[in-house]
Image: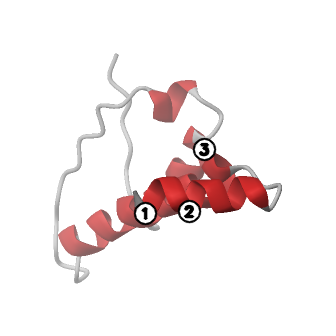
Amino acid sequence: PLVAARSRWYQEQGKDPFTDYLLPEAVLVFRQGFGRLIRTKEDRGVVYLLDSRVLDKGYGRVFLSSLPPGVKMDVVE
């Protein structure tokens, strides 16, 4: 109900709920996941992102550009 209400509010303001609300929230959670995995310079970790939309959709660039510095990415098809 909260997401629906906020999405409605964005629409009422003439904004796109996906671009202005949902996408930034998703990217924030995505970045937080990396932050919880890697806390120090000595930490190592692996993240598997199995959602092809990150590569197929235009908004995927927003996710990829939010990756922390030094993250190595391999694409496996």
Q: Mark 1 is on which residue type?
A: Leu
Q: Which mark is residue 32?
A: none
Alpha carbon separation for disc pair 3 and 1: 27 Å
Please identify the residue farthest to the bottom as the structure is shown.
40
Q: Mark 3 is on which residue type?
A: Arg
Residue 37 % position (x, y):
19, 68
Query: Can I make out residue 65 in this image?
Result: no
Which residue in the structure is indicated by mark 1? 2
Which mark is first along the chain, 3 or 2? Answer: 2
Q: Mark 2 is on which residue type?
A: Arg
Alpha carbon separation for disc pair 2 and 1: 6 Å
Q: Quadrant of residue 40?
A: bottom left
**Secondary element type, mark 2:** helix
Which mark is first along the chain, 1 or 3? Answer: 1
Please identify the residue farthest to the right as the structure is shown.
14
Q: Quadrant of residue 75?
A: top left
In front of the other: 69 or 22: 22
Alpha carbon separation for disc pair 2 and 3: 24 Å
Residue 50 % position (x, y):
29, 31
**Secondary element type, mark 1:** helix
Which residue in the structure is indicated by mark 2? 6
Q: Are marks 2 and 1 in contact (CB under 8 Å)?
A: yes
Q: Residue at x 51, y 49 (%)?
A: 64
In front of the other: 3 or 33: 3
In front of the other: 45 or 32: 32
Q: Residue at x 46, y 67 (%)?
A: 69
Quadrant for the C terminus in the image: top left
Q: Which mark is residue 61?
A: 3
Q: Residue at x 51, y 30 (%)?
A: 55
**Secondary element type, mark 3:** helix
Vertical placement of 38 versus 3: above or below? below
